Image: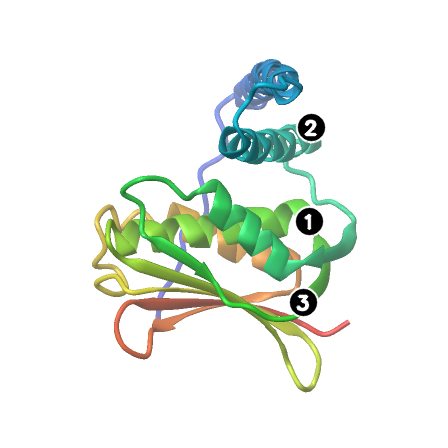
Amino acid sequence: MRTESLPAPAPPGVDRWLRGLLHDLGHGLAAASYLTEGMRGEAELPAQARDRLELVHQELVRLLELVAAGGAPGEPVAVELRGLLGRLAASRARAGAPTLLVRPGSPVHVRADQAAVWRMLANLLDNAARAAGPGGVVELGATHHPGGGVTAEVVDDGPGLGRAPGAGSGLGLGIVTALAQSCGARLHLEPAPRRGTRARLVFPGA
């Protein structure tokens, strides 16, 4: 039987240090957000650069909301999973990155903490992209269950569970597992049909 040890109590002053860190981080993100806001208004900016800048601005806004919340769970709202997966894929498209494919289909909504859903999918996508590596492929999708509930899926064609470069710490997956539990969802990891890993985030029906 696998047992988990309880975390050691935080040393005195750590909470204050974290609050200070979040405060300073929030100010830095706000400054970066102001810079992108100003650049978005420049008429001579090329269309492709404008699109990339918009993605950067959206990421900054999400991070600012996360810092402002201080890790506290948010109220459940309607989140459209396929669109969110598309935005995450677009924000991570770059030279040398794996090909990120979002399966087409109709909108798939789930009612959950929006920031938590974003963090879960971002962690799963980043893990999959790292596993697939340059020249690899990561597929993203979202589906409705016939009996209610929805699933968000991230599939990579990397070497498989625990074999990707940098594998072993499990911090990202630990974050996803904890956030999924807080949302009433479940994380399933399994070998992909051909090669690689399939991560499924299963949300219950309303």
* Amino acid type assigned to the residue bearing label 2 in the image: Ala
* Image quadrant in which you'd find residue 132: bottom left
Residue sticking out furthest to the bottom: 146
- In depth, the one of 176 and 106 nearer the eye is 106
Q: Residues within 10 Å of mark 1 (few under 14, many from 20)?
A: many
Q: Nearer the viewer, mark 2 or mark 1?
A: 1
- Disc 3/disc 2 C-alpha distance (Å): 28 Å
Which tag, 2 or 1, sits closer to the chain's start?
2
Q: Which residue is mark 1?
A: 114
- Disc 2/disc 1 C-alpha distance (Å): 14 Å
The numbered disc on residue 190 is none
What secondary structure is found at the residue carrying circle 1?
A: helix
Are discs 2 and 1 less than 8 Å apart at CB?
A: no
List x then y, in percent, for residue 44.
57, 18
Q: Nearer the viewer, mark 1 or mark 3?
A: 3
Q: Is residue 202 left or right of residue 41?
A: left
Q: Which residue is mark 3?
A: 108
Which tag, 1 or 3, sits closer to the chain's start?
3
Quadrant in which the C terminus appears: bottom right
- Disc 1/disc 3 C-alpha distance (Å): 14 Å
Q: Is residue 201 visible?
A: no
The numbered disc on residue 68 is 2
- In depth, the one of 127 and 184 nearer the eye is 127
What secondary structure is found at the residue carrying circle 2?
A: helix
Q: Is residue 84 visible?
A: yes
* Amino acid type assigned to the residue bearing label 3 in the image: Val
Q: Is residue 48 left or right of residue 147?
A: left
